[in-house]
Image (cartoon, grey):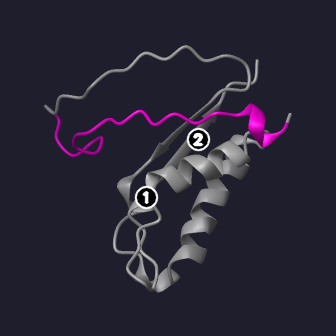
Amino acid sequence: MSSDDFLAELIDLRGLPLGIAADADYDERRVELRNGDVVAFCSDGLGECVNDMGEELGHDRLAQELTALGDRSAQQMADHLLELTDRYADTKRHNDDRTVVVLKRTG
């Protein structure tokens, strides 16, 4: 498969981070996953990562990166996204947490 065979779709869920408040309400989204499908949970610190010129990396760029990595393992995808933010911004300049969890259906 080539990266042209993969598609990324942003599912925008807003709210408090998990565990912040015991009585917090969260949106639910049901998604049917087929073999090879990927779900990536990323904190806003990835997309809002800023370079030396003050430009944010952006969620579109994260989606492009995931699309290009569609044939890789979940661990490789997560590692790549964190490395991308390190390259994009000076690693000493991260102003927010960078949390990423990637799930990939493999059967």
On residue 102, the disc is: 2
Residues in magenta, as a range? 2-22
Local crowd size for mark 1, using a 10 Å CA cut-off: few (<14), some (14–19), many (≥20): some
Local crowd size for mark 2, using a 10 Å CA cut-off: few (<14), some (14–19), many (≥20): some
Q: For this rendering, which residue is in front, 46 or 7?
A: 7
Residue depicted at 86% across the width and 33% down the height: 1
From what the image shows, is residue 93 above or below residue 13?
A: below
Residue depicted at 60% across the width and 76% down the height: 87
**In magenta stretch: residue 8:** yes
Residue type, label 2: Val
For discs 1 and 2, the disc positioned in front in the rendered view: 1
From what the image shows, is residue 38 above or below residue 67?
A: above
Residue depicted at 75% across the width and 42% down the height: 73
Q: For this rendering, which residue is in front, 31 or 24?
A: 31
- Position of residue 72 measured from the top left corner of the image (x, y, whole percent): 78, 43
Residue type, label 1: Gly
- Position of residue 69 measured from the top left corner of the image (x, y, whole percent): 73, 47
